[in-house]
Image (cartoon, helix red, strand yellow):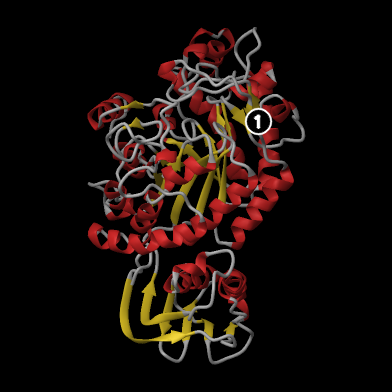
Amino acid sequence: MTTIPLPAGLVPGEGQFTFTSGTPLTADPALSRAAAWLRGTLLPATGLQLPEGTGGVEIRRVEGLGPEEYRLTATADSVLIEATGPAGAFYGAQTLRQLLDPAAFRAGRTGERVWSVPAVRVADAPRYGWRGCLIDVARHFLPKNDLLRYIDLLAAHKLNVLHLHLTDDQGWRLEIRKYPRLTEVGAWRRESPVGSIVHRTFDGRPHGGYYTQDDIREIVAYAADRFVTVVPEVDLPGHTQAAIAAYPELGNLATPLDVRTEWGVGQNVLNVSDETIAFFTDVLDEVLELFPGEYVCVGGDEVPKTQWNESVPAKERIRELGLRDADELQTWFMRHFTDYLLARGRRPLAWDELMEGGLPEGVTVAAWRGGKCAALAARSGHEVVVSPFAETYLDFRQAEGGGEPVPIGSVTSLNAVHAFDPVPGGLTEEERGRVLGAQAALWTEHIDSPRLLDYMAFPRLAAFAEAVWSGERDFEDFLGRLAVHEKRLDALGVEYRPAAGPHPWQRRPDAPGNPRSRAEIDGKLAAWTANLRF
């Protein structure tokens, strides 16, 4: 069986089920969304109408399975998908699609062929409930249609969370009606670095874009139809120079700022006034109207304290509140927004730096600085989404050598991603239960086009999907299945990295990178987390 991710349990049978032009499809009304998706997806590529009726493909509701669990039984006479919930039925339909010829993934017919699936029994369920991918649309904007395409790609790999990084120093990508300058000013910058910022070369070309509120409603609905939850991120109180450029009163300086044109951690952060807290409360009011999902990310990462340490109002806040230092001031500031979300029935997600000043109650930690942070958060009683940057940041280069486009970071190989295990060692069973799952990350400082996004994401994202769905660790077996899966990616038009290295047109000799060794990356991790204690 060549599916990716590999099902948790499967037993091959004998023979195959062959579709005909009249093969019927029937579904329990509670699972009709999976049937509608299957019809709509297969018809353009296969010509199969799958009319309503019995005796062909059935999607049956049964009791006792998990919300994303399914069973699939294909014999020479019929195909049966069983599920308790609509998500499980949808994943069963996704597996059925993968059992067909890769041409089933095309958008139109390429000729006459026999459509069949092998006889098989599948019993399948995911290891983790949070199987996500972060896409950074702030550094380089991803147009709406390209983002919708990525939602389809996530769903095809049974990934169920799209973490949408909407705001940063280099761009604000979400329309906020109460504060229109956030997009009028904050949604574009005058130029961008070419390659790594260490080379100090810029393209001199404006870059920008944003999603209207109706765009967001469309994106969220499209994702929900494919059982993908969109988690928005509005980064606070750092990574906010685009917002400060639009509304200078949010910052700590008397001089106006432009939207940032450099990568890296900027020094400009929000001030801690009541007015700034009220401003971003208004922003979150509109965010909650647009994103109905349970989780909202409020950032909290990479917040330099220089401006607060030099700011008279910030120092007065620290004295008034009896705080120890600026780290605790950040926790105080962030608690306004985490409490706001909790009071409205939402779950705040924040990056692990927030542990440095004390985690507010109810925060789910996005642990990106290695297993130490994930373990500390779980031991502190907080739920955790694991996203260690040395293992799951897919903007890192894929191999040694100068051929990789804009090579940064250490090598994050296909094998390493496939071997990734979200749960750090040394946790008790109760603590392990607080690990909700994991997400890969596509940060886009050095990914300036959808074509390059494809190259950096695939096939590593397929390996990641297998790691968080089934936990299969046989890499050689994965490579054998990947050879078939790449034909599916070809049919979908995904410009993935070939195993032999980039095509000539996938190289970027115009954009030099800044590669690092794994030892250097591990040294950074140790320095960043030295102040955290178990």
Q: Residues within 10 Å of mark 1 (few under 14, many from 20)?
A: some
Q: Quadrant of residue 468?
A: bottom left
Image check: 251 left or right of 365?
A: right
Name the kind of residue labelled 1 in the image: Phe
What residue do we see at 69% from left, 28% from top? 182
- Give the residue at mark 1: 280
Towards the viewer: 387 or 14: 14
User: Whole-percent x and y of residue 122?
Assistant: 37, 77
87 is higher (above) or lower (below) than 332: below
Marker count (numbered): 1
Label 1 sits on a secondary structure element that is helix
Query: Residue at the spot x=72%, y=41% of the render?
Result: 212
Q: Quadrant of the N terminus?
A: bottom left
- Residue 371: horizontal and vertical position, in percent? 30, 40
Reply above or below: 46 against 412. below
Left or right of 381, for residue 107? right
* Residue 22 visible from this viewpoint: yes
- Residue 137, x across and y down, in percent: 56, 37
Image side of residue 122 versus residue 192, left or right: left
Quadrant occupied by the C terminus: top left
In depth, the one of 198 and 331 nearer the eye is 198
Task: Judge by depth and name the residue closer to the eye, 266 or 198.
Answer: 198
- The answer to whether 222 appears left or right of 162 in the picture is right
Query: Which residue is drawn at the image coordinates 25% and 32% (left, top)?
Result: 518
Q: Position of residue 329 (x, y in %)?
A: 50, 22
> Is any part of residue 229 visible from this angle?
no
